[in-house]
Amino acid sequence: MSLDSPRLLTTLRDPADVVFRGVARSGGIIVLTIMSLVGLFLGFRAWQALSVSGISFLTEQAWEPDSGRFGIAAVLVGTVLIALVAVVIAVPLATGTALYITEYAPRKIRSFLIGLVDLMAAIPSVVYGLWGFFFLQGNITPVSKWISTTFGWIPIFAVDGADPNDPLASVTVYTSSTFIAGIVVAFMITPIITSIMREVFAQAPLGEREGALALGSTRWGMIRSVVLPFGRGGMIGGTMLGLGRALGETIAVYMIISPVFVIQPHILQNGTNSVSSLIALRYGEATEFGTSALMAAGLTLFLMTLVINFGASAVVARSRSGASS
Amino acid sequence: MADTMLLPVVEHATVLREDFPPLETKREERRVSGVRISDVLSAVGAAVGSLCLTTVIVTQLAPISGPIAFAAIAYIIFMVLYAMLVYLDESRPVVVDRVILVGVHTLALTVFATLGFVVIFSIVRGAEALPFLNFYTEDMSLAGPLDPLSDGGVVHAIVGTLIQITIALAITIPLGLTTALFLNEVPSAFSRFVRTIVEAMTALPSIVAGLFIYASFILLFGLEKSGFAASLAISVMMLPIMIRSADVVLRLVPMTLKEASIGLGAGQWQTVWRVILPTSRSGLVTAIILATARGIGETSPVLLTSGFTASLNVDPLHGPMVSLPLAIFQFVKSPEPTMIARGFGTAAVLMFIVLALFVVARIIGGQTIEVKERRAEGRRVFWATVSAPAVRATTAVVRVVGPQVTRAATATGRVVGPPLARAAAATGRVVGPPLSRAASTVRTTGDSLFATAAQAMRTFFSTVVTKVRALVTRITAKKDDSK
């Protein structure tokens, strides 16, 4: 009878292992505490402001916390527009660059280009801001002007107060716009997106590539039927990560835009705003309640990037290329 | 042998020529490149055509200013012309393939050119400030906005950045690596929860990390704006990034290695210390360095937490402390050209630091066993190809030059020798007697010292011998007694 009774399995751990597990677990607990503190503290401080403003926090455009009128309608729209412009520009550039590195570049320079892209991702954002403010601002306005005069009938490209028939008209209506900030952020996030896309493109199975080529497909035919479908999850995931970075970017945007507190849907026109530059602009002069309102804005931004980040990892994890990584 | 005997003898129908020329083995090298002459010609033709057409359009039909507009129009026309030219010879899929090929190359070129331009632009604009040595050794406390570049510098920002990143690393490296090990080696529902939270926190915008430290440590706990607060803000931002990349690196350690280690009787800690960490060392260092590069370049958390100062402050706990990105931000706010040049110069310094970190990361991260082997092989090949000819060349040179050198040396010796010998003799005559006198003194002293030492030794040994002998006698006497 006793032979059949199941044996109790126990693990006797070495003292060194017990200490290691204890230290590792406490490290995890400390990190978890810090991270939760950030979230909880943000939520707690934001609650003060949110309980005063209520739902109008999402619909009010002005930012005057001490008189009770404050909301993120204007800054949130600005943030999203800048990020969208950035993503619309960055995704084709990143896709092309990633395809070039994995499919077209000579084998000898490939690892050099990979290193270069990673290095570009580490360039401080303030450097991009310098470039945007001192170079791009002055050189892109003719393009802005041309787009607005040609496509001005599409509402978002319209510019108020610009007269295309007046050759002496000032170009300042085209400066400090969503468009310019978006271009700068686009070049900032292109390396990150490129790096993720390149990784998934490089994992496309060799057998399927060779199969496509053996069936007489051209190089583009092979890419379209093998590489792109295989890497779709990585492309979407990389794009969303880039979008998350674009939403949170502070300094480069702060240097370029001129802040306004109304919803500004005309992307080529002077004046826009973003949540992070609002915080950078107002934290110094804010009262306690004002800080709490800024916290609420920061929390909104954080929740937004959080949702996008989780979405990105879900997409990457469910895709074929992401299963192994 | 037997088989050949059985075969019937057949007369050969054809007789091989004895003087048949040797088989020609030299062949034309086959070109395996996919580029044909027609591809190049159609690309060049389309380029020339588009340039001409664009010039006509821009100057005659629709005046448009600016190089960007010119390039855009020229590019569109080029694409159309190129597609048409290819379509003359090829099928539709090939035309699409070619157009996409050109498009991909253009996009990649645009990205690399623009990013390269961003870097070069800052260096060129900052070149004015960089040659001044005081730029690296002085701070801005005595230099105003109107002062020339030969006054003041950014040493306060360099020192501030180094102090802040050191504190941040002292916090994040132990905590980050421990947590990454926890996520991988102590798997449980709790560790999966920690991993989810850490991944969520990588989305934390850097300004919100700064705002958290500002509102908690500075406003709530009354800490003053300082380098330490900035380090905390950078740490909050860097920690999730470092944990996430270290986690990925640790996950790549092959399961078979861990199993082998445990199978040999090692405990978990032994496995971690002797197998997992050494295997993933280069990847972990890369993770740390890349997180450092991110942390060093962040402006917004520092802007909120450290305050701005123009003078050098090496105390992270008290008083504002400026870092490189923040200094750039403050410099370019000024309308003065010299201040803007200083800003760009600071940006160049910052990028140089990031680049140096990156090169270190690449060197450490690239040290896989395979790469090391390949390098060693390369060295062997190098020495085989370089050293052998070098030795041969040296020998040849020696053979040619040697006799002449010998002859020249002999001739020189013959000319210079006698005077030298005479001079030496004269010196010897003057210096010799005192020297020999000194030598004899040394010898006498040495002799007497040696004699003394020998005497002392002799006395010592005779005493020892006597004592031992006495001892032996006593012991033997005792033995006799006991018997």
Image (cartoon, rainbow, N blue to C red):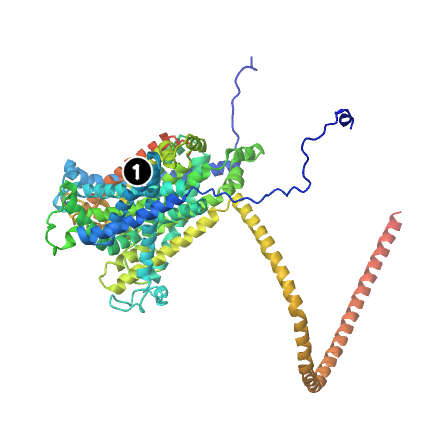
Residue at numbered disc 1: A240
Q: Quadrant of residue A134?
A: bottom left
- Relative to A11, say whether B412 is above or below: below
Measured as percent of width and height from the top left, residue A85 is found at: 24, 43
Is A105 situated left or right of A155 in this image? right
Measured as percent of width and height from the top left, residue A109 is found at: 43, 47
Element class at badge 1: helix
Measured as percent of width and height from the top left, residue B184 is found at: 44, 35
Q: Residue at x 29, y 36 (%)?
A: A308
Is A105 situated left or right of A251 in this image? right
Residue situated furthest top in the rendering: A1
The one nearer the camera, B421 or A221, is: A221
Q: Residues within 10 Å of mark 1 (few under 14, many from 20)?
A: many
Chain letter belonging to callout 1: A
**Residue type for callout 1:** Met
The one nearer the camera, B399 or B435, is: B399
Quadrant of the snapshot with the C terminus of chain A: top left
The one nearer the camera, A47 or A248, is: A248
Question: Does residue A34 appear in this view?
Answer: no
- Relative to B20, say whether A282 is above or below: below
Q: Residue at x 29, y 68 (%)?
A: B142
Measured as percent of width and height from the top left, residue B227 is found at: 33, 54
- Relative to A48, say whether B449 is above or below: below
Is B369 situated left or right of B400 in this image? left
